[in-house]
Amino acid sequence: MTNGTENIQMSPDQLLRGRYEVIVVGAGHAGCEAALASARMGRKTLLLTMNLDSVALMPCNPSMGGPAKGHLIKEIDALGGEIGRNTDRTFIQIRMLNTSKGPAVQALRAQCDKQAYRLAMKFVLECQPNLDMRQATITQLLHEPLGEGRYKMTGVVTSNGWRYEAPAIIMTTGTFINGRLVVGEKTQPGGRAGEGPALGISDSLRAMGLEVRRFKTGTPPRIDARSIDYSKTEPQPGSRVPLYFSRDRAAREDVQLPGGKPNPVYPTTAEDLHGWRPQLPCYLVRTSEKTHQVIRDNLHRSPLYTGVIEGIGPRYCPSIEDKIVRFADKTSHQIFLEPEGWRTGEVYVQGMNTSLPEDVQIAMLHSIPGLERAEMMRVGYAVEYDFVPPHQLFPSMQTKPVTGLFLAGQINGTSGYEEAAAQGLMAGINAALYARDAGTFVLGRHEAYIGVLIDDLVTRPLSEPYRLHTSRAEHRLLLRPDSADLRLSDHAYQLGLIDETRYLEVVQKRAAIIQAIDHLDQLSFTSSRLVEQCAEEAGIAPLGQLMTGRELLRRPEVHYRQLATFAQRVEAEKEQALLTFQSTLQSEAVELVVEAASDMLAVDTIVDTITTTLTLPLLEDEAAEEVDMQVKYETYIRKQEQMVHRTRRLEEMRIPETLDYQTVPHLRTEARQKLLRTLPRTVGQAARVEGVTPADVAILMIYVEKLRALKASS
């Protein structure tokens, strides 16, 4: 490993440049969230990056969100993270995906201005108290032996020989560790286009007992917007109604896009530019048989098939050549042309990741209708990089062999900005807690998609870059994106990541939801001419019988606001009927009215019915939608809550850190090997380890209970 201090003649005092509580290495999406979380928790924090102009850069698609990924952003925001706020400041398009499906899988996706996002995040970092930023390349990780092959972190050394000390180090190095860029037969060192790799870190990690492997990812070419034939594309406009990732209203108003109109080359409508927020559309095109033939004819030149690339790539974000081979029966694939910014002419060719030679990339583009004259501004490429298999981590993101070393982002073998940001946030929180010996913070699989993500990483073997999907969550109805603040804000407030004003908003929202649901149970409607008329006016199908507010809201087509309007109309009509009735009683025909009324109901019963309170509390849109979801899906939600309750005993049964699985009798050899490799912290986590059967779990439970009983008796 290269040691940048070897030939520098300085005293130790001159080399030491600062002492911190937490040092974050790398300023991508994981590093930014880690540094902000640590600093917001009051820890003296240092953020080191190879290039201060690349902070929070979006080297691949400048988009945020999508299925599961949008859920992560909502949860990060609820925990006081920045990615949601920064997306709201800088998006040029936003839309809701999967609207035809259930609420558990609907998700926001936004297209951001690439440069505006970077600059806005850098501004946030520079304004954050307790946080220093430095441009430096790390060449050495300083550590002390603890015995039995374990180490403790003490600091880092940069390439110019400067030393920074801290008990907690967070590595968020992305694709830079031993990075290699590949286009066709050409290769060169680099973490991404235009930036060199980080060398020496892998050797330092191995020296501390960590296993290091190799993965691969890629990015598509970028084309000139002026060379696209938009008449052959299908515009994909943004949402016509306001949508945001963050609950922070200040971020919504703090738009950081370049002033003025967008680049005029993009076809837009008045609705695009003059709606609730100016937006740019994306444009859909499709590959053709000619495209597929070009790729097949050049597979012998693809680094994926010639052996130039050895790392394993992501299954769920494959290269275009991989798609053509794996899905040979398909005659075309969707390609989205996505502007990289409000005023730039660079267009990202979504769905066309490739490392084929440059001439083949141009031929592929020209074979797509609408791109016959496309000019390529940047070539697509693949990048190979080192990563640390995450089974070597505790759920706190701290490594098992090295105390005080935390890893987050692509260094853990994940793909995606959102997955990286979620890990960075959790690593930042736990590093801050570790620095003051204040325990750990771990989210369960039933609490958040962040919990699902991290539990998958530390429990299950990773054979390819990890990407989060909603299908990975067994309790996804409990993890709806719009409930993230209700689920996680208590944690955020206790950790000091959100202020009291924001927390009180969530408390008030939660109380309003509870009150509204309580009112629904007290509310009832009798099927009468007056009630049915009001229902029709509110767009509600005939009741036909006595129904409570909760029963009405369970109908798929009925929503809380609609029901509240209906209740108000019924109440107003009955008040009017009461006034009319009382006026009639005072008239000269009082005896006739009473006589007629007695044939139907007693007068006092009529009055009691008329004066029943039927109003529902007014709610903000988010709270009203949450009431809708809780009522409509309450049976399914209750089942998932019962499932969580049944498994909670396993999740709460902790396994002693000193447990030697070799001494556990009757465990199968495979289970013993897998448990020794993973070192689960709870019996619940052990049950999810691949190769561990229910019988193994039962044996482990009995053994742990015996150990607990022996300890109690002694």
Image (cartoon, rainbow, N blue to C red):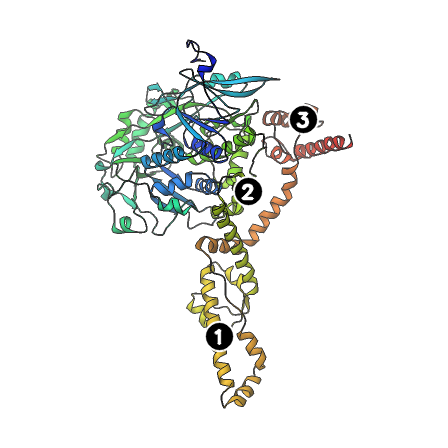
User: Quick one: label 1 or label 2, which is nearer the N terminus?
Assistant: 2
Q: Position of residue 304 (x, y in %)?
A: 38, 24
Kind of residue at badge 1: Glu
- Is disc 2 placed on a helix, strand or loop? loop
- Is disc 3 placed on a helix, strand or loop? loop
- For the residues labelled 3 and 1, the Cα–Cα distance comes to 71 Å
Q: Which residue is mark 1?
A: 575
Circles 2 and 3: CB atoms closer than 8 Å: no
Q: Which residue is mark 3?
A: 659
Q: In front of the other: label 3 or label 1?
A: 1
User: Quick one: label 3 or label 1, which is nearer the N terminus?
Assistant: 1
Circles 3 and 1: CB atoms closer than 8 Å: no
Q: Which residue is mark 2?
A: 447
Kind of residue at badge 2: Glu
- Is disc 1 placed on a helix, strand or loop? helix
Q: Counting other residues with Cα less than 10 Å from the Cα at mark 1, is it few (<14), some (14-19), or many (20 or more)?
A: some
User: Quick one: label 2 or label 3, which is nearer the N terminus?
Assistant: 2
Q: Using residue 110 as the reference point, say whether residue 529 is left or right of it.
A: right
